[in-house]
Image: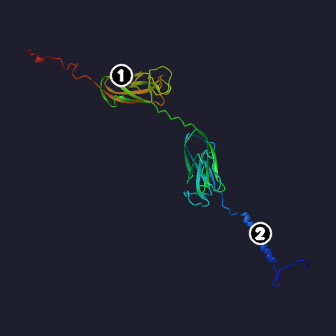
Amino acid sequence: MKGKTFLKVGGKSVIASALFAVVLLLGACTYGAAYPTTAATPAVTITSPVNGASLPAGDVTVTVSVGNFVVVDKQGQANIAGQGHVHFYLDVAAPTTPGVPAVPTSGTWAHVSGLTYTFPNVGQGTHTISVQLVNNDHTPVVPAAMDTITINVTSAPAAAEPAPTVTITSPGNGASLPQGNITVTAAVANFNVVDKQGQANVPGEGHLHFYLDVSAPTVPGVPAVPTSGTWAHVSGTTYTFSNVGPGTHTISVQLVNNDHTPVVPAAMDSVTINVTSTTIPGYGDGGYGGGSYGGGGGGY
């Protein structure tokens, strides 16, 4: 052919062989571009608390999830690609300079070979929490892998006031007593006994109702006054029931507000007593004194 040069081997043209080699080379390049072999990038995400969460003051626990990264307990050892630990930061900007330990010069932070850390005693206000994946020597992974959220910490809820209680201290449950006057004594807790009956209610103060053989009314907002039976409203912790006759009796006491309504939740106590007769058999029934000494046969 005029104007073309062919390489011949053994009298044959090798242009076909050269073209085939070029095709193979181009195919290899195309395959490599379509299927890169670069390892996936490590990632970290704060899973709890969520961004914008409102939490009470106190301990705040942070939990993370990681991807393409193995959390190991090898802090201070030689770096190994794809493994390391987690740094947790509270209101501190996470240092991200490659090759420099991600350790802030001040502030609250922690290095943890795990996925959870609890910041203790976090006070009221807006706080920023950050986490970062670091190598065994505390330097940031490259490219940096971190996540940040903001939380609102509210004041700690006030401790609930203990509920008022009342206990009958005397007589004891099951006691046997002679008929007559029965004095009942009670002890109260978390409650102030005051002489303000009929006045406006004040939480945590009031007086006592004593009941004898009467079920104590406990409907909230309704004066704890039975429709019949023996009872008393007392600005004190002792009351004496008069002329209690023989038999089994139930004594109850209840804490009530100034307007006689039960405290909520109801605070009451009950005991059962056995009242015995004080009459000596024979006296007053003709058994004695009905005859004379000496048999009527003479005197002394």
- Dot 2 lies on which element? helix
Q: Decide which of 188, 83 is in the foreground and name it.
A: 83
- Name the residue tied to disc 2: 26
Q: Amino acid at mark 2?
A: Leu
Q: Which image quadrant for residue 74?
A: bottom right
Question: How is the model colour-coded?
Answer: rainbow
Residue 117: % across, % down: 55, 49
On screen, residue 62 above or below 230: below
- Name the residue tied to disc 1: 240
Residue 127: % across, % down: 61, 42
Residue drawn at the location 12% of the way across and 17% of the way down: 293
Q: Earlier in the sequence, mark 1 or mark 2?
A: 2
Front of the two marks 1 and 2:
2
Residue 229 visible to the viewer: no
Q: Which image quadrant for residue 296?
A: top left
Residue drawn at the location 42% of the way across and 24% of the way down: 209
Residue 248: % across, % down: 33, 28
Residue drawn at the location 75% of the way across and 67% of the way down: 29
Q: Amino acid at mark 1?
A: Thr
Apparent side of residue 12 relative to residue 265 in the rendered image (left or right): right
Residue 170: % across, % down: 34, 28
**How many callouts does the rendering have?**
2
On screen, residue 281 above or below 34: above
On screen, residue 31 above or below 228: below
Residue 85 visible to the viewer: yes
Name the quarter where the N terminus is drawn.
Answer: bottom right
- Dot 1 lies on which element? strand
Distance (Cα) linking label 1 and label 2: 111 Å
